[in-house]
Image (cartoon, rainbow, N blue to C red):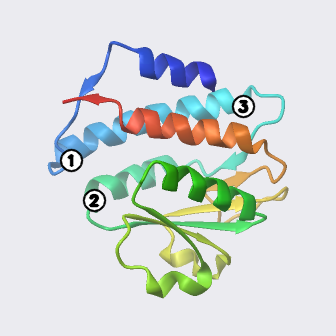
């Protein structure tokens, strides 16, 4: 993953920042994110201990369609199973970068109204409010968009977060 991050940051092939207020700009971003996410999945599959156990095959298309058609709606991510360490890692990562992300427990969901991205640790009972459903564990969860290995290397998880951050903030003005 470190090689992908370095390649992205050192590349001279930066794309011009699209106008995310236009549908065309959001479509460009969606295509770019689809490509980068597929790279992450392929890279992860070749690791000795992959982080992704499974990925819903319809997720990427559904998620990018939502980004294009409902950009003003805040993004709600649900993390169930053994996700406490994952949530702490995300919280530390996003706070350090001053990103508009709020990591909360299920009990506090109704109290949040200002963040662009809300990550909720807790129960799968709220499946209908999640844009992204992540289950951390060793068993399949048919409602999850992703099932992550509960024994994953959290340093590797941070590298993936760093890569996502790098590719979504690597534009020339």
Q: Are marks 1 and 2 in contact (CB under 8 Å)?
A: yes
Element type where label 1 sits in the image:
loop
Q: Rate crowding at label 2 as few (under 14), some (14 to 19) or many (20 or more) other CA atoms within 10 Å.
A: some
- Which disc is residue 45 wearing? 3
Q: Residue 109, position in %: x, y?
A: 51, 82
Does residue 141 lie above or below 105 as drawn?
A: above
Q: Rate crowding at label 1 as few (under 14), some (14 to 19) or many (20 or more) other CA atoms within 10 Å.
A: some
Gap between marks 3 and 2 measured at Cα: 31 Å
Q: Farthest residue toward the top?
A: 12
Whichever of labels 3 and 2 marks the residue nearer the N terminus, that label is 3
Does residue 71 lie above or below 44 as drawn?
A: below
Gap between marks 3 and 1 measured at Cα: 32 Å
Q: Rate crowding at label 3 as few (under 14), some (14 to 19) or many (20 or more) other CA atoms within 10 Å.
A: some
Q: Residue 25, position in %: x, y?
A: 20, 41
Q: Residue 47, position in %: x, y?
A: 77, 28
Would you say 14 lies left or right of 62 here?
left
Give the quarter of the image for residue 114.
bottom left
In front: label 3 or label 1 = 1
Gap between marks 1 and 2 measured at Cα: 8 Å
Would you say 89 lies left or right of 111 here?
right
Residue drawn 25% across the image and 46% down it:
26
Residue drawn 53% across the image and 25% down it:
5
Element type where label 3 sits in the image:
helix
Give the quarter of the image for residue 162.
top right
Q: Residue 52, position in %: x, y?
A: 71, 44
> Looking at the rendering, in which quadrant would you find the C terminus?
top left
Residue drawn 55% across the image and 29% down it:
39
The residue that mark 1 highlights is: 20
- Which disc is residue 71 wearing? 2
């Amino acid at each position: 993953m470190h090689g992908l991050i370095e390649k992205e940051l050192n590349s001279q092939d930066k794309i011009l920042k699209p106008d995310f207020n236009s549908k065309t700009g959001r479509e460009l971003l969606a295509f770019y994110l689809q490509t980068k996410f597929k790279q992450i999945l392929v890279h992860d599959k070749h690791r000795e201990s992959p982080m992704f156990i499974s990925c819903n095959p319809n997720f990427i298309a559904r998620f990018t369609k939502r980004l294009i058609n409902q950009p003003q709606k805040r993004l709600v991510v649900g993390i169930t199973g053994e996700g406490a360490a994952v949530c702490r890692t995300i919280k530390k990562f996003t706070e350090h970068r001053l990103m508009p992300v709020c990591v909360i427990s299920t009990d506090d969901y109704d109290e949040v109204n200002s963040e662009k991205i809300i990550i909720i640790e807790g129960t799968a009972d709220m499946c209908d409010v999640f844009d992204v459903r992540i289950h951390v564990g060793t068993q399949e969860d048919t409602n999850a968009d992703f099932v992550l290995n509960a024994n994953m290397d959290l340093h590797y998880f941070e590298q993936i977060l760093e890569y996502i951050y790098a590719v979504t903030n690597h534009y020339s003005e």
